[in-house]
Image (tube, rainbow, N blue to C red):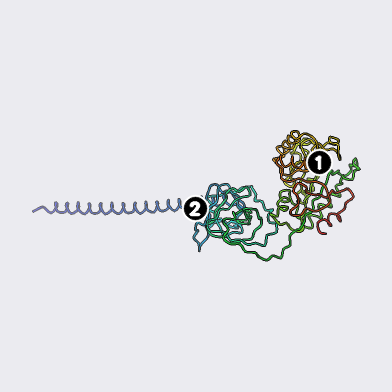
Amino acid sequence: MRSKPLRVLIIVTIFTSVISIGCGIFIYNDMKVRADMSNSVIKTRESLVKEEDKLVRIKDNYSSVVKTTKDTKLYINDNGKYLESGSINEGNVLELETIDNISLDNQYFKLLDSEYYVSYKDVIPTTDTVNKRYLNYVEFPLEITTKDNTIFYDDSFNQIFTLDSPVTTKVIVNLDDYYGISLLSRLVYVNKEDINNTVEVNTDIESAESIPAILYHFIYLDGDNTCNLTICHSEEQIDSHFKFLADNDVFTINTSEVLSFIKGEINLPKKSILITIDDGSRAENFIPFLEKYQLNATLFLVSSWYPVSKFSSPYLEIASHTHDMHTTGVCPTGQGGGINCLPESEILNDLKLSRETLNNTKAFCFPFYEYSDYSINLVKEAGFEMAFIGGSTKIKKGIDPYKIPRYPILSSFGVEYISNLVLG
């Protein structure tokens, strides 16, 4: 038999070992719990950081106007689930609905006046704008419904987006092969072959049967009395005319809208007018008044006389008044503008140079209002799609687009004259 001391030693050793093992297990478990807790905290912190980063990106990518950064998807919200419902091309400008307090719930931005959404990941803010002039047009009494998976185009007929489901809406522009409609808060075009149904509808809105075009020449600032011609205008006269147009919500159209109106492609409101300015001398003095009242006008510029940059304004369109053929006595009839008798090659060179100088404008104005079949044919050959003359009649649908009339405005004409043209 073992001695008592030996048994005690064995028991003590075993007890000590058990205690040590228990302590080790306890320490291990405690360390494991602490490690698990630490990992959990780290993961929670990482998750919070990711959410914070995502929220920052959502906020950074939101604006009232955004641009797509790639070809991407359009979505609809089906009870909180965002389902693919179309696609939109890279570089498209979109207007978004207002979000007052952006949160992680706003990972899809809703497009203005639409049921469609885009992912925050696929857009960035932009200073580009969407052309809204079409909102002034009068809709045709025609409602269309598109087919499934229809492609929509911009005004250059480049594809911009596709929608999986049909759309029913009214027609704003009626071209030979396309309808222009308002969709995704912009004017887009759809091929008539992609229309499933058309229905004539009633409308109470009257559109213009004819549009006046008015013609100004030289504005002289207050205190400058060096011009006594009837085609010289004072600041007071211009301000009163333009104030009347602004106060009465008259739509000031541009030359492309004139051509579309003549062709019957658009309907314009009854209160519409085209403001034109001839030559370029002192024309920069019109710009403060146009910008003050936010009115649009067209300057027919003799492009060799002044640099285009002199007339820079979002409210002033620049069109052609020849490059250097606004000279009297060149031809034997009338005031003798050279466009009616110079050799074809000389005239064409001048007209083409003018177009190139003026960003390939499609609008032309005959010097001294003088034209002939000879000059009209050369204007067409040079690439112009319309030409303006003088006269005292309004623009009507179906008229010759190379003989568009304008009312010359004289220094003695007051607001009543403009009022009669627009409201009479």
Q: In this view, does 39 lie to the left or right of 329?
A: left
Mark 1 burial class by Cα count in 10 Å: few <14, some 14-19, many 20+: many
Mark 1 and mark 2: Cα distance apart in space: 67 Å
Q: Quadrant of residue 368?
A: top right
Q: Which amino acid does label 1 sit on?
A: Pro
**According to the image, label 1 marks what residue?**
367
| Residue 231, position as x, y percentages in the image | 87, 45
Count of picture labels: 2
**According to the image, label 2 marks what residue?**
51
Mark 2 burial class by Cα count in 10 Å: few <14, some 14-19, many 20+: few
Q: In this view, does 25 lie to the left or right of 382?
A: left
Give the residue drawn at x 87%, y 48%.
410
Numbered disc in front, either 1 or 2: 1
Residue reaching furthest front? Answer: 373
Most foreground residue, 7 or 345: 345
| Residue 379, position as x, y percentages in the image | 74, 41
Mark 1 residue element:
helix
Give the residue drawn at x 88%, y 48%.
411
| Residue 375, position as x, y percentages in the image | 77, 40
Q: In this view, does 51 lie to the left or right of 67?
A: left
| Residue 391, position as x, y percentages in the image | 83, 49
Tell me if I can see residue 107 in this picture.
no
Tell me if I can see residue 62 in this picture.
yes
Which quarter of the figure is the C terminus placed in?
bottom right
